[in-house]
């Protein structure tokens, strides 16, 4: 396995991690922004108002995007294990 193969494998791993994490991060960012705007407008500065909706949004996004995430992870793992003989020598 030469350097090009290692870099390609690392790029694929990073891409998979980004694709798997992106839905939860984007939804959490959006909900956090909306809650912050609501807190600024109403002048309510309660700490739990920032965390509870984000936790619920991440949980719901995990339920919604979970099968797609598992599909991506299993595709990456099966590709990695299927080409294990290339990576070993």
Image (cartoon, rainbow, N blue to C red):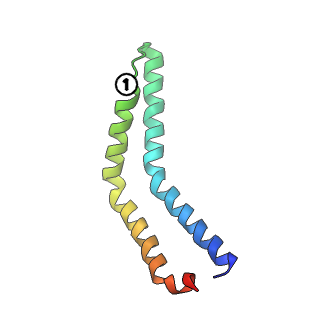
Name the residue carrying label 1.
49
Image coordinates for residue 68, horizontal then vertical, percent: 37, 62
Report whether 81 appears left or right of 6: left
Image coordinates for residue 31, horizontal then vertical, percent: 42, 35
Residue 2 falls in image quadrant? bottom right
Image coordinates for residue 26, horizontal then vertical, percent: 48, 44
The image quadrant where one finds the C terminus is bottom right
Picture residue at 40% right of the left edge, 22% below the top: 47
Picture residue at 42% right of the left edge, 27% below the top: 35
**Element at label 1:** helix
Report whether 77 appears left or right of 2: left
Residue 69 falls in image quadrant? bottom left
Q: Residue furthest top?
A: 43
Q: Nearest the camera: 64 or 72? A: 72
Picture residue at 46% right of the left edge, 52% below the top: 21
Picture residue at 69% right of the left edge, 76% below the top: 3
Q: Is residue 8 above or below residue 32?
A: below
Q: Residue furthest right?
A: 3
Q: Nearest the camera: 77 or 32? A: 77
Report whether 3 appears left or right of 34: right
């Amino acid at each position: 396995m030469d350097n090009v193969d290692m870099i390609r494998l690392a790029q694929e791993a990073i891409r998979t991690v980004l694709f798997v994490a992106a839905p939860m991060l984007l939804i959490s960012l959006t909900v956090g922004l909306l809650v912050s705007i609501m807190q600024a407008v109403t002048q309510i500065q309660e700490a739990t108002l920032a965390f509870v909706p984000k936790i619920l949004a991440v949980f719901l996004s995990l339920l919604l995007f979970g099968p797609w995430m598992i599909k991506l992870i299993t595709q990456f793992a099966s590709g990695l294990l299927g080409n294990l003989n290339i990576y070993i020598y």
